[in-house]
Image: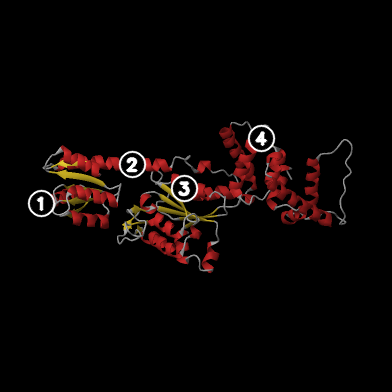
Amino acid sequence: MKQLKILVIDDEKLIRWSLEKHLSAKGYQAIGAESGEEGIKIFEQNHPEIVLVDNKLPGIQGLEVIKKIKSLDEEAVIVFMTAYGSIETAVEAMKSGATEYINKPFAFEEVEVILDNIKNKLKIIKEIQVLKRQQKDIVTFDHIIGESVQFKQIVHLARKIARTKTTTILLLGESGTGKDMFAHAIHNDSTRHDKPFITINCSSLPETLLESELFGHEKGAFTDAKQMKKGLFELAEGGTVFLDEIGEINAATQIKLLGVLENRVVRRIGGTQSIPVDIRIIAATNRDLKRAIDDKSFREDLYYRLKVFQIILPPLRERRDDIPLIANHFITHYNSQFQKNVSHLNEGVRAMFLEYNWPGNIRELRNVIERAVILETMTSLQPDNLPNEMIGKIEQADNSSKENYTQGNIGTSGSIVEFNIPNEGFSLYEIEKQLIIHALKKSDNNQTRTSKMLGISRDTLRYKMKKYKL
């Protein structure tokens, strides 16, 4: 835990000086105030974690000081000091918001015991807050599925970056490619894994509210600021802040964020004090930030501060070999959730999944599997349970392929190739295989030209060549 600030409010100079000296020797940052009014002012400026306040003060009395400080920050930890030993006064102090009380005169050892108890409570509270934020399944790199060479290289790079202490990371990729999972995995694989992981979607909040959420605000900074509020950068102390959709923040917030990255300090809205923060920032966007720099909607200096390490996550259509793996993972997940017994993809569904372009990427695949598992009554996922719009897009692509075929892209004479189906039938598997062999011969084994002839992507062609061992 970072060095705690303790404010001592006592009009007796000797007691105040002794406490400041003793606390400083024990590793605390001690500040003194000789009156309630001065103590409240110092509290507003410095926001100490713990306040020691005497009962009898000139001007505002100790009980009123407690109430005022709690109105400024309801999380403030206050130790009430009284020379009168009155149970009624101590009870009143606790009702007003004091955490502990101590009778004067006291030995420094008594103060140490109380402060140790408070530190332990603060640590437990912090741990509970972290656990609440991590109630969802902990995501690690083991949960990220992908066997393609390109994707394995990306995961390997992310693992290496995760183990650095403060490196800022920029995740780029289309919507649904798993940027949030990578951010979670990086945090959980880092030395910060036992500290907070806080996510904020920069596009989901109004501009003014976003700035308040990130940086916090002082009491009275704006109309609704009835209390001081710590921002997410402060709350994430020691941990990670994930700024999703970073490309959507306005110019003023961009400048403030640049200051955080350069100086590792934050300043609350309406505040004058710079507050040091020890955090890692992971930012993500599906926007083209270089284009945003060109049209002046994103700062170039902020872009280069964010991309100390840049990881580009490929769309699902560029890693088709991973589609069946990811689909089966989701089938297992939803089998458990909905008490189903779907064991695998029907061969027709598998082929459709490999042909489809997945504009919504992994998120779309997950939604399709969830829907299909809910509707499925058999042990394999059937085409009937896929969304109509998905089937329509595949059929549209098939029709386009047929048009290219009938125009003579494959046929030697440019005529339509007709098949006479014998009564005993024939193997569609073998026909597709022979068609690919024919196209490869015609293109001199050029995969790009072959895929154009067949009206399919190069990834799909490679999958089918692997399937038919060509």
Q: CA distance from mark 1 to mark 2?
A: 34 Å
Q: Is residue 317 left or right of residue 267?
A: right
Quickly name the residue at label 2.
Answer: 125
At label 4, the amino acid type is: Glu
At label 2, the amino acid type is: Ile
Quickly name the residue at label 3.
Answer: 186
Quickly name the residue at label 4.
Answer: 376
Quickly name the residue at label 1.
Answer: 14
At label 3, the amino acid type is: Ile
At label 1, the amino acid type is: Leu
- The residue drawn where x is 68% and y is 50% is 459
Q: Nearer the viewer, mark 3 or mark 4?
A: 4
In terms of sequence position, does the residue under pointer 4 or pointer 2 come before the other? 2
| Residue in front for this viewpoint, 42 or 403 | 42
Q: CA distance from mark 4 to mark 1?
A: 79 Å
The disc at residue 239 is none
- The residue drawn where x is 65% and y is 36% is 375
Disc 1 crowd rating (10 Å Cα; few below 14, some 14-19, many 20+) is: few
In terms of sequence position, does the residue under pointer 3 or pointer 1 come before the other? 1
- The residue drawn where x is 53% and y is 68% is 294
